[in-house]
Image: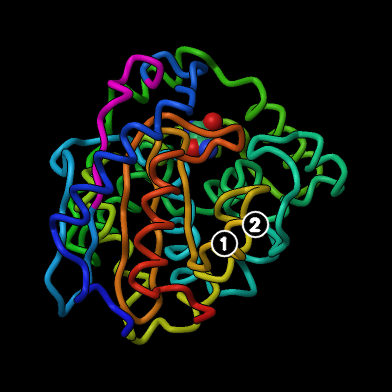
Amino acid sequence: MTGFTTLTQTQLDRWVAEARAISHTGRIPDYIPRLAEVNRDRIAVQVQAPNERCFSAGDSTHRFALMSVIKPFVLLFLLKQLGQQSVFRYVGKRPSDQVFHSLAQLTEDGGFPRNPMINSGAIALADLLPGKDGSDRCEALRHWLNHSSGASLTLDEAMLASVRSVGNETNRAIAQLLKQSGYLTSIETALDTYNHICCLSGTAIDLAQLGLLLASEQSMADDQRTVNALMLTCGLYEASGEFAVRVGVPTKSGVSGALLAVIPKHGAIACYSPPLDDTGNSVAGLWLLEQLVRSLNLSLFG
Ligand code: GLN
């Protein structure tokens, strides 16, 4: 039987306790000061489907910055606003084989970003969002997401200040190359927008609500299918292929330790646990997801 119906709260609580111990093998990123200060033992998971009982375990009311987990939703928003043709003039659909902030990958590809799930692609898409500056554009995205999903995302101002304080030179170099190659109009606006949207924050419950935007059987099927396919092939960066074989559901990670999996036409699973593996994916999040998907038979591939 497929679905969340065979899950029990006791089982989920047990997995969360085990996942917390496993998370200790991961590392907390230190390139954004405020991310380096988080409580590494904090953990949350939310399992949600529209017509089924939902499950929460761990600290499901704790708010965290979504970081790269926002990327699929920037893509979804722009696909709805501009359509597939316009969007994919500025970003590709190919998996990357280098780190998520790789300038080398972008250089190798002549300045055309491989996909929307890595920094280059998301910075190019941030440039396409409607609005005069980063704050305006982030607000437009935030409103649309909250309105469409019922989530309560807010901008984490302290995280944004922290991101700005380090002035991420790699992202700036990426934006410069995008501009030189004709895939970006304004370096400053694109980076400011990108920094803002990465600092949108919410709880694991909010994140699962967002996930349902990609899981429901509603009218935007074409756009959802596109976003889900790119999450499956690119959402965990260079680890995406291996994870697709091992687990087999569209998944997106963020450097904050956020992780979202979509079970198409069914529901969503959101996790949060800050320690990351070498690729930049939450160690406990991936482990929890694997337990859930396997034991509940949720893989797309049966
Ligand atoms: N703001 C982060 C960065 O650009 C987001 C990256 C991530 O979550 N992987 O470094």
Does residue 296 appear to the left or right of 169 in the view shown? left
Question: Predominant secondary structure in magenta?
Answer: loop
Q: Secondary structure at mark 2?
A: helix
Q: Residue at x 38, y 42 (%)?
A: 258
Q: Position of residue 24 (x, y in %)?
A: 41, 26
Q: Position of residue 216 (x, y in %)?
A: 31, 79
Q: Nearer the viewer, residue 224 or 271?
A: 271
Q: Secondary structure at mark 1?
A: helix
Check whether the beta carbons of the residues at disc 2 and disc 1 lie within 8 A of each other: yes
Q: Examine the rendering and report whether any part of residue 189 can be seen.
A: no
Which span is picked out in magenta?
35-45
96 over 5 or under it: above or below: above
Callout 2: 10 Å neighbours few (<14), some, many (20+)? few
Residue 242's disc is: 2
Q: Position of residue 259 (x, y in %)?
A: 40, 48
The residue beneath circle 1 is 246
Q: Nearer the viewer, residue 256 or 44?
A: 44
**Residue 135 inside the magenta-drawn segment:** no
Q: Position of residue 200 (x, y in %)?
A: 32, 40
Measured in 3D between alpha carbons, the distance from the residue under mark 2 to the one under mark 1, in whole angstroms, is 6 Å
| Amino acid beneath label 2 | Glu
| Amino acid beneath label 1 | Arg
Does residue 105 appear to the left or right of 186 in the view shown? right
Callout 1: 10 Å neighbours few (<14), some, many (20+)? few
42 over 182 or under it: above or below: above
Q: Nearer the viewer, residue 109 or 298?
A: 298
77 over 267 or under it: above or below: above
